[in-house]
C-alpha cells in the first residue's frame, strides 16, 4: 500500500511516508493545492469500525481530538489515555497512536482536527525546531497532552468544529481559506488556555541539537556533521533524538530545510536552483525529489497553489 492514499485515524487525507525499523508506518499529510492543510472529521465509534485503520501508526502532522460525549481509552506511544466528555487530546507528530483501542469503544463521539503548521500564519513562519515552544502549541508540548473543556464551554467548541467542517466542505467558497485559518487559530488559542501550568522542561541535549541545526541547515550538512560537532557518534545521537522527539536527527534537518523552502516558494520568485543552494540542498533536481517525497507535490505546483 506504499504511497497509496488513505484516510488516517485523524481523518486527514494522507499517504504512507515511511516505515520505522519496528514496522510502524508514518503517514504524511496530503495537501491539496489551494486548500489549507486542515482536515476535520467527526466520528462515532458505533459506526467508525470500517473507517479507522486497525494498526498502530504515526503521523507527521499535528492532531487534536475533542471528545463530545462518551468515554473510553486509546493509546499514544504505548501509554493508555482515558477519553471523557470535554477532553481535548493533543497528539504531536511522530507519536504512535494505538487506533485499535479506539474502535473497541462504545458510544464515544469525538472530533479530530489534523493540520500542519502551514495552516496558521503565526506558525508557518516559525522554525519547526521552535514549534514545541510556541504558545499556540502549548498542549502539544505538555507532559500529559490533555486539556479539559469546562461544561459551559462545550457547546461553543462543538459549534467551532461544526463551522470549521462546513468551511472545509466547500473550500472554493469566497473567503473560506481565511475563515478556516481564523477558526483553527481560535481553536489553538482555546486549547493553549487549557494547558496545565506545569510544562515539560526543555531537554538540554535536544536544545543543543536544534541550535546546531538552526545555525548550519543552510549548508550541505548531514546528521553525521551535526553529531560530530556536538561530540557524539551519529548512531547514538540519532537514536537519542528519535526517542526524545519522535523523529530521527536527519528528519529534523530535512524538516527545517523544507520549512525554509516553503517560505521561499511562498514569499519570493527565486528559481528552484537558487532556493536549493540557500537551503543546503544539492541542486534543483534533488530539491524537487525531496519535496515530492515529503509533500506529494512538486515545488512549482505547490507555489502556484499558494498564490492561487
Image (cartoon, grey):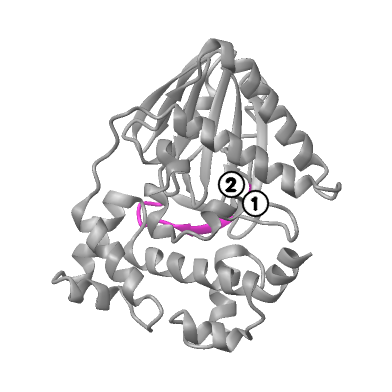
Q: Quadrant of the C terminus?
A: bottom right
30 relative to 9, above or below: below
Q: Nearer the viewer, residue 155 or 25?
A: 155
Q: Residues within 10 Å of mark 1 (few under 14, many from 20)?
A: many
Badge 2 element: strand
Q: Is residue 178 left or right of residue 106?
A: right
Contact, mark 1 vs mark 2 (Cβ under 8 Å) = yes
**Which residue appears at 62% of the width and 27% of the height?**
49
What residue is shown at x 51% (from left), y 66% (from top)?
A: 259
Q: Residue at x 36, y 56 (%)?
A: 247
Dominant SS in magenta: strand
Farthest left residue? Answer: 231
**Residue under label 2:** 115
Mark 1: secondary structure:
loop
Sequence-first tag of 1 and 2: 1
* Residue 267 image-quadrant placement: bottom right
Residue 213, given in percent of the width and then of the height, sits at 33, 70
Up/down of 42 relative to 214, above or below: above
Gap between marks 1 and 2 measured at Cα: 6 Å
- Give the farthest residue toward the right: 173
**Residue in front for this viewpoint, 244 or 54:** 244
| Left or right position of 225 against 86 | left
Q: Is residue 266 above or below residue 169?
A: below
In the image, the segment drawn in magenta is 13-23
Side of 268 where 22 appears, left or right: left
**98 relative to 238, above or below:** above
The magenta stretch spans residue 22: yes
Query: Image quarter for residue 233?
Result: bottom left
* Residue placed under numbered mark 1 in the picture: 37
Amino acid at each position: 500500500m506504499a504511497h497509496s492514499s488513505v484516510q488516517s485515524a485523524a481523518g486527514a487525507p494522507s499517504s504512507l511516508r515511511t516505515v520505522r525499523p519496528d514496522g510502524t508506518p508514518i503517514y504524511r499529510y496530503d495537501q491539496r493545492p489551494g486548500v489549507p492543510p486542515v482536515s476535520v472529521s467527526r466520528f462515532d465509534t458505533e459506526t467508525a469500525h470500517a473507517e479507522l485503520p486497525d494498526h498502530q501508526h504515526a503521523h507527521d502532522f499535528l492532531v487534536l481530538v475533542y471528545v463530545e460525549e462518551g468515554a473510553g481509552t486509546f493509546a499514544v506511544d504505548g501509554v493508555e489515555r482515558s477519553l471523557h466528555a470535554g477532553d481535548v487530546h493533543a497528539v504531536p507528530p511522530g507519536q504512535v497512536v494505538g487506533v485499535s483501542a479506539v474502535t473497541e469503544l462504545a458510544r464515544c463521539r469525538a472530533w479530530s482536527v489534523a493540520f500542519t503548521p502551514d495552516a496558521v500564519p503565526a506558525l508557518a513562519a516559525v522554525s519547526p525546531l521552535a514549534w514545541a515552544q510556541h504558545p499556540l502549541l502549548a498542549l502539544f508540548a505538555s507532559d500529559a497532552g490533555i486539556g479539559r473543556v469546562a461544561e459551559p464551554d462545550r457547546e461553543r467548541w462543538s459549534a467551532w468544529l461544526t463551522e470549521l467542517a462546513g468551511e472545509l466542505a466547500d473550500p472554493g467558497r469566497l473567503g473560506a481559506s481565511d475563515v478556516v485559518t481564523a477558526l483553527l487559530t481560535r481553536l489553538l488559542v482555546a486549547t493553549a488556555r487549557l494547558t496545565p501550568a506545569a510544562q515539560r522542561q526543555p531537554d538540554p541535549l535536544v536544545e543543543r541539537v536544534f541550535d546546531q541545526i538552526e545555525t548550519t541547515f543552510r549548508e550541505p550538512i548531514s546528521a553525521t556533521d551535526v553529531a560530530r560537532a556536538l561530540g557524539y557518534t551519529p548512531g547514538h545521537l540519532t537514536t537519542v533524538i528519535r526517542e526524545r522527539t519522535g523523529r530521527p536527527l536527519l528528519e529534523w534537518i530535512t524538516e527545517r530545510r523544507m520549512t525554509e523552502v516553503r517560505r521561499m516558494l511562498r514569499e519570493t520568485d527565486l528559481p528552484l536552483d537558487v532556493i536549493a543552494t540557500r537551503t543546503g540542498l544539492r541542486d534543483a533536481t534533488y530539491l524537487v525529489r525531496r519535496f515530492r517525497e515529503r509533500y506529494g507535490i512538486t515545488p512549482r505546483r505547490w507555489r502556484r497553489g499558494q498564490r492561487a
